[in-house]
Image (cartoon, rainbow, N blue to C red):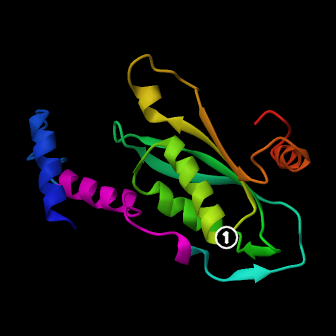
Amino acid sequence: MNQLAKEGIEQFLRALSVDTKAPELEKTPIRVAELYEELFSGVGKDTKALWGELFSTDYNGLVAVTDIPFYSMCEHHLLPFFGTVDVIYQPHSGCVAGLSKFNDVITVLSRKPQLQERLTREIADAIERDLSAEGVFVRLKATQLCMLMKGTLQQGSQVVTIESRGLLREAGSLRDEALAMLGGTNV
């Protein structure tokens, strides 16, 4: 456990007039510090090694991995945002990644102070760069707790971000096929 983080949380709570000596709160700084160590465990990590072994196939079509859950922390308020990621990619020369590896990469990229827009881009970057994908389409749908808990309390709202690259960037039959894999033209 990071002692500096624990002390910082304790000071933060005291600054807000929270009695950290109360029996029910005396372990809270340790718990919060340990939680944030886990929530920020992706800071400075590279995704390349996470993909593991790539597999050659004679498959030439699009590959979609959808509804991958993610949880991250908004860098503006340090409140959670969470939702699902849909990934569609065109493998390079039939070279595909293990399907569970998409979850691993998304988890590492989301485990740091983050913006949804940046996370969307970083996922697309990792797939394009690490897999040499010829086309990439990434969609994140998220609930942002800062929107729900402060200000106008925008209950039920979701934020959708999209990043597309290569063969899936421009309108055409391949992009239409990708959109159909996600349930139609309304992404």
Q: Residue at x 49, y 35 (%)?
A: 144
Q: Nearer the viewer, residue 10 or 85?
A: 85
Q: Magenta stretch mostly in which secondary structure?
A: helix
Q: Is residue 101 above or below residue 4?
A: below
Q: Is residue 112 above or below residue 147?
A: below
- The quadrant of the image that shows the C terminus is top right
Q: Is residue 169 above or below residue 101?
A: above
Q: Residues within 10 Å of mark 1 (few under 14, many from 20)?
A: some
| Element at label 1 | helix
* 80 left or right, relative to 24: right
Q: Residue at x 71, y 69 (%)?
A: 99
Quadrant of res 127 = bottom right
* Residue 185 point in image, percent of width and height: 84, 35
Magenta range is 27-49
* 64 left or right, relative to 153: right
* Residue 162 point in image, percent of width and height: 65, 42
* Residue 84 point in image, percent of width and height: 63, 47
* 62 left or right, relative to 100: right
Q: Residue at x 10, y 33 (%)?
A: 17
Quadrant of res 65 = bottom right
Q: Residue at x 54, y 55 (%)?
A: 122
Quadrant of res 37 = bottom left
* 180 left or right, relative to 168: right
Q: What residue did someone put label 1 on?
A: 131
**Membership of 134 in magenta stretch:** no
Name which residue type carries label 1: Leu
* Residue 20 point in image, percent of width and height: 11, 45
How many numbered marks does the figure carry? 1
